[in-house]
Amino acid sequence: MSSSNSSVNGGLSVKRIAVPESPDAGNASDFRVFHGLLVAHQRELWGNQDRSPTLAEAVHFWQGNAYEERQVFLAYRDGAVVGSGTLTLPLSENTTTAGVDVLVDSPFRRRGFGSRILGVLEQLARGRGRISFDAYCEEPIAPVLEGAALLDAKSGTGGVPVDSASTQFALHHGYSLEQVETNSTLPFPVEEEVLRVLDVEATRRAGGYSVIAWQDKCPEELVDVFARLKSLMSTEVPIAGLGWEGEEWDALRVRQEESTWAASGVDSVVAVARHDATGELAAYTVLTHRGALPAVIYQEDTLVAPGHRGHRLGMVVKIANLRRAKELWPDATSVMTWNANENRHMLAINIALGFKPSGFEGEWQKRLE
């Protein structure tokens, strides 16, 4: 690997590209090609862009931050772009891990280009002392529902089609399937009568708690306790055998996430449940929305702190947020969420609200030691 972060492998050139300051920056052309490959792939796979970031969102994400370095690559063959790769390097926690992703444009698949791109990414990661590589692959749910033979996840719950190209690619390169997440979609808005019935039932169990909500920016008086609650998100949700360390969140990290969303054209609404007797924040949920893709809302984190479970707080905060989203984003027609298959409690909440499975995500890992 040369100092210019480029590699030539079997006639394929893999080159790290600059992430521009904005989508309109003078050096944005390569990044636009990179983003265009992703959008084309999403359209091929899903028939829409519902799961792909906007260009502005991608620019700000791949700039990285103090908590994670992010690198973007394009692969060339005879002057033509044939694919892309990304490498993410955590800097605060999980500093022996790296995230890798490979995409080969459809006309150039099954020629070994993906393997060569992955080899470059893994070599770079090893050079930074990373000994565990993580990768994800999200696909439509149809083959699973139709009874395709599955490779079971090590978590013991869920699997991915064993004969799919992504599964065979991962296995060929020594990755193991640690966990499977279900991607679910909810028609939006949810009928108020459905929310009312669920809310009455949940509120009966949630005595002693109050719901607080905000848009885009956490109130200053809550940001420290909210950060402590967000720290639990990385340790209290199922992670199977992925072995990740917990993330440490403070007010600065919360504000960094909020500012990145704002710069990317992403709006957010948050609902939290506060324990009246102690003032502790016991649960939270986040929805995000992109004005450039107004039909889709993303359900981000939802968490109930361990000491406050059993009071239906997850349902209470989700209902509050869905009602607020209806007011703020009237053009939205669906909400998307992702949950580990073993997270039965949260999946049950989503099913009660009306979410239906639409995709799955295999979470793969390769350990060198």
Image (cartoon, rainbow, N blue to C red):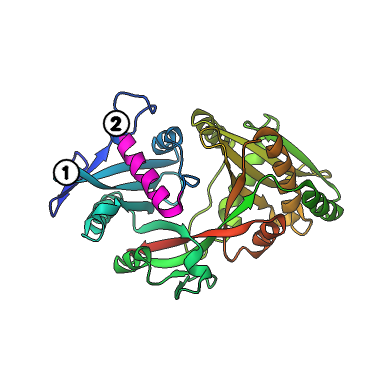
The mark lying in front, picked from 1 and 2, is 2
On the image, the x and y values in percent for residue 96 come to 38, 54
- The picture places residue 230, in percent across and down from the top left corner, at 61, 45
Residue 300 seen: no
Pick the front one: 278 or 35:
35
Left-right relation of 186 to 146: right
Q: Which of 19 and 78 is in front in this view?
A: 78
For the C terminus, the image quarter is bottom left
273 left or right of 2 in image: right
Q: Is residue 79 left or right of residue 351?
A: left
Q: Would you say residue 294 is visible in this rendering?
A: yes
**What type is the residue that disc 2 sits on?**
Ser
- Residue at figure coordinates x 75%, y 38% from the top left: 212
Q: Is residue 62 magenta?
A: no
Q: In which quarter of the image is residue 174?
A: bottom left
Give the SS element for disc 1. loop
Instruction: Judge whether 208 appears above or below 217 on screen.
Output: below
- The residue at 66%/58% (across/down) is 346
Q: How far apart are marks 1 and 2 (CA)?
A: 23 Å
Q: Mark 2 points at which residue?
A: 29
The numbered mark at residue 2 is: 1
Q: Where does the image place residue 361, in percent across and percent down from the top left?
A: 48, 59
What segment is highlighted magenta in the picture?
31-47
Q: What element carries label 2?
A: helix
Who is closer to the viewer here, 238 or 104?
104
